[in-house]
Amino acid sequence: MSSSEPRLTALDALHRSLGATMTDFAGWDMPLRYGSERDEHTAVRTKAGLFDLSHMGEITVTGPQAAQLLNFALVGNIASVGVGRARYTMICRADGGILDDLIVYRLGETEYMVVANASNAQVVLDALTERAAGFDAEVRDDRDAYALIAVQGPESPGILASVTDADLDGLKYYAGLPGTVAGVPALIARTGYTGEDGFELFVRPEHAVELWQALTKAGEGVGLVPCGLSCRDTLRLEAGMPLYGHELSTSLTPFDAGLGRVVKFEKEGDFVGRAALREAADNAHQAPPRVLVGLIAEGRRVPRAGYAVVAGGEVIGEVTSGAPSPTLGKPIAMAYVDAAHAAPGTAGVAVDIRGSHEPYEVVALPFYKRQK
Amino acid sequence: MSNPQQLRYSKEHEWLSGAEDGVSTVGITEHAANALGDVVFVQLPEVGDTVTAGETCGELESTKSVSDLYSPVSGEVTEVNEDVVSDPALVNSAPFEGGWLFKVRVSEEPADLLSADEYTAFSAG
């Protein structure tokens, strides 16, 4: 597979006409920001933002044993997801290491859509295909079948309601239903990665421009702005949401990441990673591994992924994501730290920022929770 | 964007004003500010510090990254822009004006500073 030419989304020309600064993300040329990423962040927190997320990897699983296959291949109880609902879950290796975190939408009795991170889509597709052996189910690569547009923020229900007849009031968080938006067929999902109310709209690529323009027009009067991946990262960080490659990796189990709740041992049948994850779950109780915590700066220097967390001259952890938080007005970070230093309010914790130990406050995640 | 004709430029994307009483003003270019994104923290040299052309003398933090600040000339720092320390967004909103970074009494200038037109071509490439 050639990696020299970046992949372009169906909205590429539109992004350029809006003056977007583009960036390479997992082989895709994606909007990083259109103007100020802080303004985009604030718009999503207070009004609404429009995102092109077409790099996300859609994989369709169909067939009489689609549910059984996904229960075997993933750590969650996917068979228990109702039609029209979605579930946050993970796919692990036999040794319990996380291959990716996923959202699985149940589109019908025998049809699911698995949405993988762009950087892992091929890995997930390969793993699902391999794990499908012996199941009466088909795994289909639908990465090119969809564009994905998200509208996120408190104004998003009103914006979307003005361009669809779909029952948005009946559409709960982590639910998805097929409908028509601005005249184009869409899977309307109430999901997101911002910590705000919002929607993700899966449409055919040839409908993406039309939908984007309709949403832009619908949001004109209420402060909707186009938003890039830069603010998406600060939004999810404030919301305490993990990002693969930062908080999640093959060298960590869901229990290491503090997300053991996604592993459903009680579900029927075996699943990939069960034995190793059982062990990880037991260990987590007896000897807690490093704990994922929030850090808030007392100063203004920003911690970055990979920086050491220190206390009493000893390295006690590592920053996995860090950024200046537009909402808090201070630098924040997520970090794995030794359990002894993980309690909120633990004194004497600092981040080694290029040789200087800057004091940080240990807090529970998330940094930001929207008022409902 | 246009780079002011009266300034000269380094390949590390700093600008340098013409000297007044031997003192020049230093900032980063609009091109550099755009590439950084929203600047949230600026660490500048202190008044009295000696800076050396091509060497780091501070840092600029933006949402996505941290970048070293290089001095385009050698000399002694005579003034730093306290406004930009308290409001780093000035680097983005007015990189050639209110977002200036520090003033330096120039002792030595490298021979390879660029004119506005040369820098425009350089930064476009």
Image (tube, coloured by chain):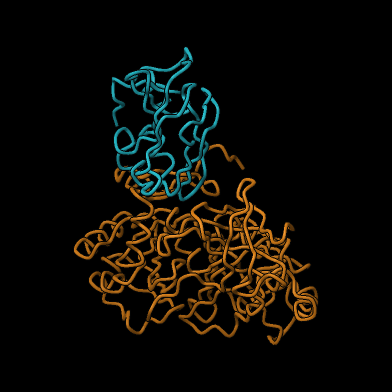
Q: Quadrant of residue A97?
A: bottom right
Coordinates of residue B58 in the picture (x, y in percent) = 51, 37
Residue A265 seen:
yes
Q: Colour of chain A?
A: orange
Counting the numbered discs, the total is: 0
The image shows residue A204, relative to residue A270, as above or below, that is above
Which of A288 and A80 lies nearest the eye of the viewer?
A288
Q: Quadrant of residue A284?
A: bottom right
The image shows residue B32, relative to residue B90, as above or below, that is above
The image shows residue B39, relative to residue A99, as above or below, that is above
Residue A132 seen:
no
Coordinates of residue A364 in the picture (x, y in percent) = 56, 74
In the displayed orientation, state which residue is furthest to the top: B111
Q: Which residue sits at x=67%, y=78%?
A: A263
Quadrant (top left, top right, bottom left, bottom right) of the N terminus of chain A:
top right
The image shows residue B94, relative to residue A225, as above or below, that is above
Left or right of residue A264, residue B110 in this image: left
Q: Which residue sits at x=49%, y=21%?
A: B74
In the displayed orientation, state which residue is furthest to the front: B48
Coordinates of residue A42 in the picture (x, y in percent) = 35, 61
Q: Colour of chain B?
A: cyan
Coordinates of residue B103 in the picture (x, y in percent) = 39, 29
Which of B34 and B94 lies nearest the eye of the viewer?
B94
Left or right of residue A68, residue B48 in this image: left
Q: Quadrant of residue A63?
A: bottom right
Left or right of residue A242, residue B96 in this image: left
In the displayed orientation, state which residue is furthest to the left: A221
Q: Which residue sits at x=69%, y=76%?
A: A72
